Image (cartoon, grey):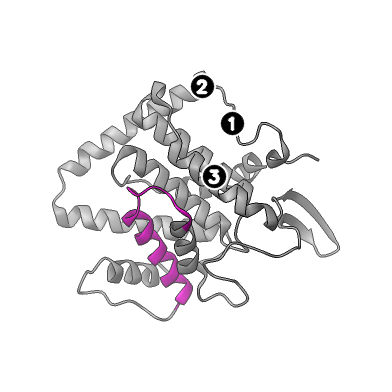
């Protein structure tokens, strides 16, 4: 089986533009309606809405990976990181604190060009409390990075990522591709939607970390959308993905 990264054309992505234009138009319409409603909110209500959206993203991106946290733990950590005085960060669940911290960092850096440092910082935040994981480092092992399912001894290999030894070349190529991305003929919103989708696919293709690739990749998708729209977007990508998780994995294949 030839994987996408083994193709001579990689990373040239080909898609049917007429097929996605109606989807982009619908997204732009819905986003406009939401933005219009939010404009009438007080600053306090905007902050509360922003917290709820980040909470949803933190919970859903974790649930996609089979991790479940209480709303109270994640919200407490989010509000502590946002500087809301009546909330204090809970230490009961370090993983919940980590995903909440990551959500804040993604929003704080949405306007910055993506860099190796940003990716490594995100990974360190997410995986610092995970035993046996080199937090804040790209994988270096000689063993294949594979996505598998099934029981030990009877598993199916769905995907194999590029060898670790190729990452020092492939990661900078990805970063340059991302930062140079332009698609002016479908508008700013369309450009954001396409970059969000393709950046996520490209990143998951590389699978550059030992663990946490899915959560980092979805965070990158959110950053890409906000970056091109030049404002944090009031949506949760992972909430939509989690509604049809099986299709999400099938499309990634």
Q: Which residue is mark 3?
A: 174
Q: Earlier in the sequence, mark 1 or mark 3?
A: 1
Chain-order first, disc 2 or disc 3:
2
Q: CA distance from mark 1 to mark 3?
A: 13 Å
Is residue 244 visible in the rendered structure shown here?
no
Report whether residue 146 is seen.
yes
Disc 2: CA contacts within 10 A as few (<14), some (14-19) or many (>=20): few
Residue 107 falls inside the magenta stretch: yes
Please, is residue 76 above or below residue 157 in the view? below
Q: Nearer the viewer, mark 2 or mark 3?
A: 3
Residue 189 locus on image (x, y percent): 36, 32
The tag on residue 13 is: 1
Residue drawn at x 41%, y 43% is: 224
Part of the protein shown in magenta: 93-116
Q: Quadrant of residue 86?
A: bottom left
Per the image, label 3 sits on a secondary structure element best described as: helix
């Amino acid at each position: 089986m030839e994987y996408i990264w083994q193709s001579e054309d990689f990373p040239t992505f080909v898609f049917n533009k007429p097929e996605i234009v109606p989807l982009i138009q619908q997204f732009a319409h819905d986003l406009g309606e939401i933005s219009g409603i939010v404009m009438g909110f007080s600053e306090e209500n905007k902050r509360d809405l922003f917290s709820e959206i980040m909470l949803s993203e933190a919970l859903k991106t974790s649930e996609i990976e089979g991790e479940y946290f209480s709303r109270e733990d994640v919200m407490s950590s989010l509000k502590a990181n946002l500087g809301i005085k009546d909330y204090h960060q809970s230490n009961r669940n370090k993983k919940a604190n980590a995903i909440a911290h990551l959500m804040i960092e993604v929003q704080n850096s949405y306007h910055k060009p993506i860099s190796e440092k940003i990716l490594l910082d995100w990974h360190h935040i997410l995986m610092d409390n995970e035993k046996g994981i080199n937090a804040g480092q790209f994988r270096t092992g000689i063993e294949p990075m594979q996505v598998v399912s099934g029981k030990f001894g009877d598993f199916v290999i769905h995907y194999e990522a590029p060898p670790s030894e190729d990452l020092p070349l492939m990661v900078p190529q990805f970063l340059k591709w991302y930062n140079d991305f332009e698609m002016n003929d479908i508008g700013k919103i369309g450009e954001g939607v396409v970059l969000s989708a393709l950046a996520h696919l490209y990143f998951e293709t590389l699978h550059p970390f030992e663990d946490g690739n899915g959560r980092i990749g979805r965070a990158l998708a959110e950053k890409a959308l906000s970056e091109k729209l030049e404002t944090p977007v009031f949506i949760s990508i992972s909430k939509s993905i989690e509604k049809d998780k099986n299709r999400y994995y099938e499309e990634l294949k």
